[in-house]
Image (cartoon, rainbow, N blue to C red):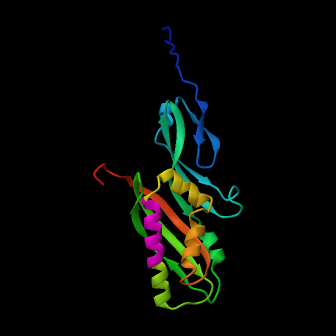
Amino acid sequence: MAAQKQTKVITKRRKFIDVEIPLIRSKIELIANSPKEIENKTIKLDLTRQLKGKSVEVVVKVKLQDNKPIAEPEKIKLMPYFIRRMIRKRISYVEDSFSAPSQESLLKIKPFLITRKKVSRAVRKTLRNKCKNWVEDYVAEKRDQEIFNEILSNRMQRPLSLYLKKTYPLSLCEIRILEKVRPLRPEE
């Protein structure tokens, strides 16, 4: 009889690695062998409980800073069921979609406005144009991290709503989607 050769399989033990998310000031744990392995991974987080019922989903991307994993926001999305809950009969809503450069990258922004009563097309067009101009000016002088923080804490929507109130009062003024498209090149 031939002696059977035994081979020993060596496996690395996977462990929990803390990933810091400065946007919501918390940590989450991901399973991996090393921090290098979770670099460039994307994580979807539902922030409904943290924002007291405002249904927001955040996509963050893990980056390594000083060999420490930190999650930076890539996209904020207001959930469709939250918007459906806000829409009533005999009102008008205004949507728009445009790209605007911030200090660091090109952002895709989709504002969503709900008026208190039904309004004419001319008023909706005016609201859309004023909103676009205001947001482009606001975003142009801020960094990405600041913009994401201000949208989550409602510090961007409130002044926008007050500005647009002069045209027509709004019952809801939200940024439906904010997404990083690409980093800006130095010549831009």
Q: Residue at x 61, y 73 (%)?
A: 83
What secondary structure is the magenta-colored segment mainly?
A: helix
* Span shown in magenta: 129-140
Residue 174 x %, y %:
57, 69
The image shows residue 14, relative to residue 180, as above or below, that is above
Q: Residue at x 47, y 67 (%)?
A: 135
The image shows residue 5, relative to residue 92, as above or below, that is above
Q: Residue at x 59, y 44 (%)?
A: 21
Magenta segment includes 132: yes
185 relative position to 105: left or right: left
Quadrant of the rendered structure where residue 173 is?
Answer: bottom right
Q: Quadrant of the C terminus?
A: bottom left
The image shows residue 69, relative to residue 114, as above or below, that is above
Find the residue positioned furthest to the left. 187
Disc tally is 0
Magenta segment includes 138: yes
Residue 140 x %, y %:
42, 60
Residue 98 x %, y %:
41, 69
Residue 170 x %, y %:
60, 79
